[in-house]
Amino acid sequence: MRRTRILTAVLALAAGLLAGTPPALAADAPTATGSPDTARTALAADTYTWKNARIDGGGFVPGIVFNRSEKNLAYARTDIGGAYRWAESTKSWTPLLDSVGWDEWGHTGVVSLASDSVDPDKVYAAVGTYTNSWDPTDGAVLRSSDRGASWQKADLPFKLGGNMPGRGMGERLAVDPNRNSVLYLGAPSGKGLWRSTDSGASWSQVTAFPNAGNYVQDATDTSGYASDNQGIVWVTFDESTGTKGSTTQTVYVGVADKDNAVYRSTDGGTTWSRLAGQPTGHLAHKGVLDAANGYLYLAYSDKGGPYDGGKGRLWRYATRGGTWTDISPVAEADTYYGFSGLTVDRQHPGTVMATAYSSWWPDTQIFRSTDSGGTWTKAWDYTSYPNRSNRSTMDVSSVPWLTFGANPAPPEQTPKLGWMTEALEIDPFDSARMMYGTGATIYGTENLTDWDTGGRFTVEPMVRGLEETAVNDLASPPSGAPLLSALGDIGGFRHTDLTEVPSMMYTSPNLTTTTSLDYAETNPNTVVRVGDLDSGPHIGFSTDNGANWFAGTDPSGVTGGGTVAAASDGSRFVWSPSGTGVQYTTGFGTSWSASSGIPAGARVESDRADPKTFYGFKSGTFYVSSDGGATFTASPASGLPSGDSVRFKALPGTKGDVWLAGGASDGAYGLWHSTDGGATFTRLAGVEQADTIGFGKAATGASYQTLYTSAKIGGVRGIFRSTDKGATWTRINDEAHQWGWTGAAVTGDPRVYGRVYVSTNGRGIVYGDTSGTSGGDGGGTDPTPAGACAVTYRITNQWSGGFQADVSLTNTGTSAWNGWTLGWTFPDGQRITQLWNADHTQDGTAVTARNVSWNATVAPGSSVGFGFTGSWTGSNTKPTSFRLDDRTCTVT
C-alpha cells in the first residue's frame, strides 16, 4: 500500500525518448534567492539522447484534466514527478517539466493544472512540493502558450504543496471559461484565494474572500507537514453566467473547513458569501458543475486524503433554486471511505460518476448515475460474501507488475481497480472514454458505456510515458541484466530490456521501498537488497542476478533498510540497517554479528576487488574493514564533508580505489578520490559540488573507467562525464533535461560506453546515450551457443482463462553465448498473448523464443530471463522439456 511520499531529496538537503520539443523554463523575475548568475567556467558538452527505463507509472496521480473545447487534449499532474500531456497518436504521455533544475527541485510537485478552453494552446501549472521547511523555495504558477513545450514562471510569495496532505482535492487552479485572462488559485497555509487578471503573469490576493480554511490533518505534527492548513482546495466557474470576453459572474470555491466548505460569488469575484443551507461535518474534495442542468455536484469526506477518510457523502446543489439534495449512493453508516473522484459526462450531463477514494480494502469503488444522482450502480458488488460480481474486466498485460505479485483471498482481487482514486474524468468529447488516477498508475477504459447496457467495460493502464518512481539506488552489473533499481513505494525492478516494462517488481520479500542494493563484482549473479516493510524481513538475496529472490533474516532491532554491501565475490555481506548498528555475515544472512569500530547509521560499501575489504562513512569520518566487516578502523583522512549527505563507491577491479561525493553548501562539498583504500583522500579541483559518483565502460583508448556524477562544475549544475579520471569534465545533459533533484544515484553501464543511468525523485530512471554511439547493446548474428543450459519455468499468476509466467535460461557451460534460441511445446494447448524481453513465434503448441539485441550475450554461469502472459482452457500444465537450439536443457 502507498505511504506518504517524502522525497529522497528532503533527506539529503535537510541533513520513452522524451517526445516533442524539449521544454524550456523562463522566469519573469529573479528566483526566490534573487542571486545573480555566477561566472561560469567553459565546459565541454556532449549531445545525449535521454529516455526512461520503462516502468510505466509507479506513483500517485492526483489530477487529470481534459480541455473542454479541443478533443484529445488532456493533462495529468503528479505529486512529485511533474506534469504530462496526452499524445493521442501514440496513446502515451509526454513529460512537460523536465526543465526544472536542481535549485528549484520542489517545482516538480504539481498541486494543480488548468487547461484553457478559450485558447487550448494555453496551460497552467501551480507548482511546489512542500509548504513546510523541507522545500527551500516558494511556489510558482507556470504558464505556457504552446501546451507545455515551454514555460514562463510567476513566483508566488508562499509555498505550494504538491506532495502535502489534501493534494488530491481540487482543482485549485482554474481559468475563467469566458474571459481567459482571469484565473484563480486556492492557496494553502492560510494564504487565501488569489487571482490573476493578466493570464497568470502576476497574482494578487482576493482580500474580500472571507475564509482561508482551518482544517489540518494532525495539529500535533511539529514538522509542519500534517499540521498545515489545507486552505482553499477548488475553484469552479458557472460558465452560463458570463458571455464570451466578459468575466464569469458566478464562481464557487471549496474551502478546507468542515462547517463552511463552499463559498460563492455572483458578481465576478467582488464579493463572496458562504453558500446557504450547505451540509456540515465533512470536507468538499471536489466541486463539479453541470451548467446545462444547473447542478453543482460535491464529493465530501471526513478527512483531507489521499490516504485517510472514513466517512463520506455526495451532495447536489441546484444552482437555480438553491436546493440541496443528498445523492449519496449508500447510507453514511455504510461508508468506511470518503468520496473524492467526481466527474460529469459533458455529452450526457445527467451522467455522474464518483469514487470511494479511501476504500483501500478490498478495493476502490466507483459509482455511476445516469439520472443526476437519483440512482446509482457500482463497479462491483457482492453476490454472496466474499464473492464479487464485477462490471469491469482488468487487463494489465501492458504493465504486468500491477498485479503486485499478489495472490489474495476473496473479496480482494488482483489486479485491483486501485486505491487513492481522487482523479476521475470522463472524456468531454467521448462518453465511452474515462481515465482515473490511482496510487500507482492511470487506468482507463474506452467502452465505459457498456456499464449501462449490462456489459463489462475493460479497464487497462493508460500510463505509458508517465514515469513516476522515486529512485534510491541503481546498479549496472558487468553481466546479466543491464540495470537493477531500488525504488520508493514499489520496491524496484530488474530491467533486462530498458524499453519494456518488467513483468514484476522484486518479490520474496516484497519490500515497500528498497533503500539500497548491491551485487558481487566478480559474481554478478549474487545480489542483495534491503528496504522498508511493515512486518517481515528487511533483506533479500538473489543468486541469479536478481531474477528470483529469497528473504534473509533480520538482526535484532532492525526497523528499516539502510544500506548494504556485498563482498566482491559474494561470500559475505555488510549491512547498516535502521534501528540497530552495522552488522556482517558470511553466506546469506542466516545469522548476523555486530561490527565493531563503526557507528550505527554509517553508509557502507564494498571494495570491488578484495572480498574482505569494506568501507563506511559517518559524520565526516571514513571507516575501513579488512576482515570482512567484523571490525572497522577510522581513517585519519581529514577535510571530508562533516554531514551525512555523502555517497561513495569503489572502482571495479582495483583494490583501494575509492571515490566520495557529497557535502553541504555551508561546509565541505565536492568530490574526493583515494587510491590507498581511504587512508588519504584528494579533493578534485574544479568540482564545486558533487552528490553522486558512478563508473561505466572506459572510452576507446582510455586506461581508466568513465566517471559519472551529478554535480556543479564550472558554475553549472548538471550530469557530468569524465574519461580521464576527473581531470576534465563534459556536461552531458542540458537545460531542457534536468529532472529536478538527481542526487540519489548515478551509474554508467560497464558494457556500453557513454551510457549512464540517472536517478530522479519522481521522474523514474532516466538513461542517456551519447551521440557518439548507436545506443545499442550489440547484436549481430545468432550462432549456435556452445555449452549446456538450464531452464526455470515459473507460473507467477493465474486466473480464469489466463496466466503469467517467467522463464529463466542459464548458461551452465564454460563459453559465452552470442545469441540464443529456446524452444518448447505447451502440453495443454496454451497460447502466448504477449511476451517481453525476447522475440517469439508460436506454431500450434510449439513456441520459439529468441534473444533481442541487448540480451544476446550470456556469460558462463549467467542467466537471461523473459516473461509472458497467455491463455489456457481446461488445464495449465507446465512444459517439461526445453531445447536450446539442438540440445536439451536441464529443467529446474
Image (spheres, grey):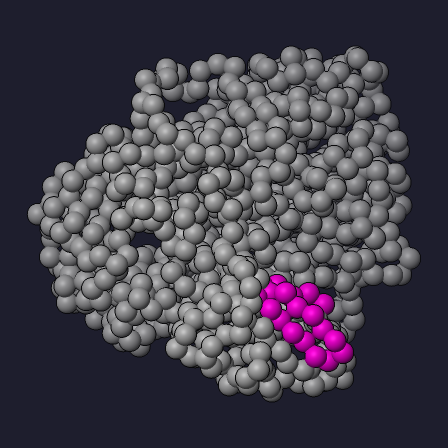
Q: Is residue 295 visible?
A: yes
- What residue appears at the point 32 percent right and 46 percent down from the top-left corner? 701
Task: Please report the bounds of the magenta region as a residue range.
Answer: 833-851
Classify 197 as above or below 453.
above
Residue 556 image offset from top left, x and y in percent: 28, 69
Classify 269 as above or below 557.
above
- Main SS of residues in magenta: strand
Relative to 64, is 699 on the left or the right?
left
Asked which quadrant contains residue 343, the reply is: top right
- What residue appears at the point 41 percent right and 31 percent down from the top-left corner? 45
Asked which quadrant contains residue 867, the reply is: bottom right
Asked whether 794 or 241 is in front, the reply is: 794
Report how many numbered discs are placed on residues in the image. Answer: 0
Residue 748 image offset from top left, x and y in percent: 39, 49
Query: Does the stretch in magenta take in 845?
Result: yes
- What residue appears at the point 35 percent right and 27 percent down from the top-left corner? 43
Residue 490 image offset from top left, x and y in percent: 51, 57
Residue 635 image offset from top left, x and y in percent: 11, 51
- What residue appears at the point 17 percent right and 47 percent down from the top-left corner? 674
Q: Is residue 762 visible?
A: no
Query: Does the stretch in magenta take in 7?
Result: no
Relative to 729, is 108 on the left or the right?
right
